[in-house]
Structure formats: C-alpha cells, structure tokens
C-alpha cells in the first residue's frame, strides 16, 4: 500500500489517538470488559492499559505489522494471555459464541467490509456478550455532513481508508446487536472528523 499507509500512518495514529481526551474516552469504553476479550483493529495497543482486571484472555485482530510492533511493550505489561487470531475483522477465525466481549475503538471507520465485520462480531459473541465501541462517524448536523462528504475522498486516502461518513449506530443495529448504551457528540478536533459514538451493544440470548 505504500510507505505512508504501511509505515508512517500507524505511527501517526499511535501519537494522535493518545491525547488526554482520547485516553479518558478509552478508559470509559473499556469499563466492564471481562473474560475472553476480542479487540478488532487492535492497532498499537492503546487500550491495553485500560483493560479491567476481569479480562482473563486477550484475542487481537490487526493487519498492521508496524502497529503490532508498537504494541509489544504495552502487551508485555499484561498478565492475561494474548493471541493474535487474525488480520481482518470481516473474517474472524473464531468459533461461534466464543468470546465474552468485543472491543472496537476508531476501527469501524476503517475496516473496508464493515457490515461483514459487525456480523462476525455478532457471530462470535456469546449470548449476552457485549460489544464495547468508541468510534467516529457520520455527524447529525447538515453543514458538518456536507464537509464530511467533501473531505471523505482525500481523508480516506491519507488516513488508511478511514470513512468519516459511516452511521455507526445504524450499522451496529443492522448486524442484530442491541444498543444498550450510546453517547454521541463532538469531541476535540475538526467537527467533520470528530463526531463520536461511544457505547455498548449486546447480542441477546
Ligand atoms: C485508526 S486505527 C485505530 C487503532 C486502535 N483501535 C486504536 O484505537 O488506537 C484503525 C485500525 O484498524 C486496523 N484495520 C484496518 N483494516 C482492518 C481490518 N480489515 N480488520 C481489522 N482491523 C483493521 C488498522 O490497521 C488500524 O490499526
């Protein structure tokens, strides 16, 4: 894909997505994770320090070798066993109903086949299992939406395929998950890039 996307951009993400504001949101979204956890789009492991003690096993899906290298010292600090179980959230090499929780942060914007990825999340979650999500996506304000439409082609090229126009809550619901908690609003940064969706969605029994 090129030097920028493969080598530079994962390092940019590692820097930009660990501001105090983002870290506070990470702490919130990680609250309540437990048991066998799958994190899709694991990146450089910026959520690891927010995992609660109740997480007993960590499964990760991440295609970027550079991000995984950056994650190594963070993973070295956890006690729970860690396994990389794949490189594509849209095709999970895990049995049905095999994980307690799934975590996705700033990733549903980037996975090309996001609908398939959410169906996979639904498939691998145990009954009553929960998806914890912190994502950015489509804004509700028409003037901001216009800017999202304008910026999308260039932003996507620069930002590893990131699509700022995705209606995250609708996509999650369309996969059959039930949204139990949702907080939305603009975070820090330019409004077309910073409309956030944070919450939890469960696979009902
Ligand atoms: C903006 S980064 C966010 C990384 C991390 N989740 C975080 O919060 O810092 C998006 C991540 O999604 C990963 N990604 C891209 N395509 C993917 C796919 N098909 N399946 C899973 N992850 C993917 C990228 O390599 C990147 O690490």
Image: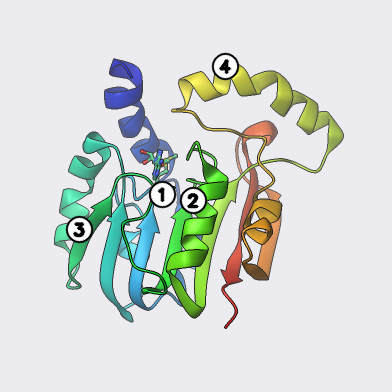
How many marks do you count on the picture?
Answer: 4
Task: Tell me the SS state at disc 2.
Answer: helix
Looking at the image, is mark 3 or mark 2 earlier in the sequence? Answer: 3
The picture places residue 90, in percent across and down from the top left corner, at 44, 47
Task: Tell me the SS state at disc 1.
Answer: loop
Using the numbered discs, state the Cα–Cα distance from disc 2 to disc 1 in whole angstroms. 5 Å
State which quadrant residue 79 falls in. Answer: bottom left
Ligand 1 shown in quarter: top left
Q: Quadrant of the N terminus?
A: top left
Structural crowding at the residue carrying mark 3, measured as other residues with C-alpha within 10 Å and reported as few (<14), some (14–19) or many (≥20): some
Mark 2 C-beta closer than 8 Å to ligand 1: yes
| Observer able to see residue 21 | no
- Residue under label 2, please give it: 117
- Residue under label 1, please give it: 89
Taking the spot 49% from the left edge, 19% from the top edge, the residue there is 157
Structural crowding at the residue carrying mark 2, measured as other residues with C-alpha within 10 Å and reported as few (<14), some (14–19) or many (≥20): many
Q: Nearer the viewer, mark 4 or mark 3?
A: 4
Q: Looking at this rendering, what residue extends furthest in the right direction?
A: 142
Looking at the image, is mark 3 or mark 1 earlier in the sequence? Answer: 3
Looking at the image, is mark 2 or mark 1 earlier in the sequence? Answer: 1
Mark 1 C-beta closer than 8 Å to ligand 1: yes
Q: Nearer the viewer, residue 37 or 139?
A: 37
Discs 2, 1 touching: Cβ within 8 Å: yes
Q: Which mark is residue 154?
A: 4
Q: Looking at this rendering, what residue extends furthest in the front direction?
A: 96
């Amino acid at each position: 894909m090129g030097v920028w996307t493969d080598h530079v951009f994962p390092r940019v993400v590692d820097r930009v997505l660990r501001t105090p504001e983002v870290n506070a949101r990470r702490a919130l979204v990680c609250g309540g994770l437990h048991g066998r956890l799958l994190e899709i789009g694991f990146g450089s492991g910026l959520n690891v320090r927010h995992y609660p003690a109740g997480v007993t096993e960590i499964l990760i899906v991440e295609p970027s070798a550079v991000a995984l290298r950056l994650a190594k010292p963070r993973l070295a600090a956890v006690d729970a066993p860690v396994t990389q179980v794949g490189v594509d959230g849209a095709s999970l090499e895990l049995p049905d109903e095999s994980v307690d929780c799934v975590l996705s942060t700033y990733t549903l914007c980037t996975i090309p086949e996001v609908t398939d990825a959410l169906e996979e999340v639904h498939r691998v979650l145990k009954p009553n299992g929960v998806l914890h999500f912190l994502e950015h996506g489509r804004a509700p304000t028409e003037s901001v939406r216009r800017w999202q439409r304008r910026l999308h082609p260039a932003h996507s090229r620069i930002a590893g395929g990131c699509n700022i126009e995705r209606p995250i809550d609708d996509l999650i619901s369309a996969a059959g998950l039930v949204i139990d908690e949702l907080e939305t609003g603009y975070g820090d940064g330019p409004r077309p890039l910073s409309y956030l969706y944070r919450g939890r969605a469960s696979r009902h029994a």
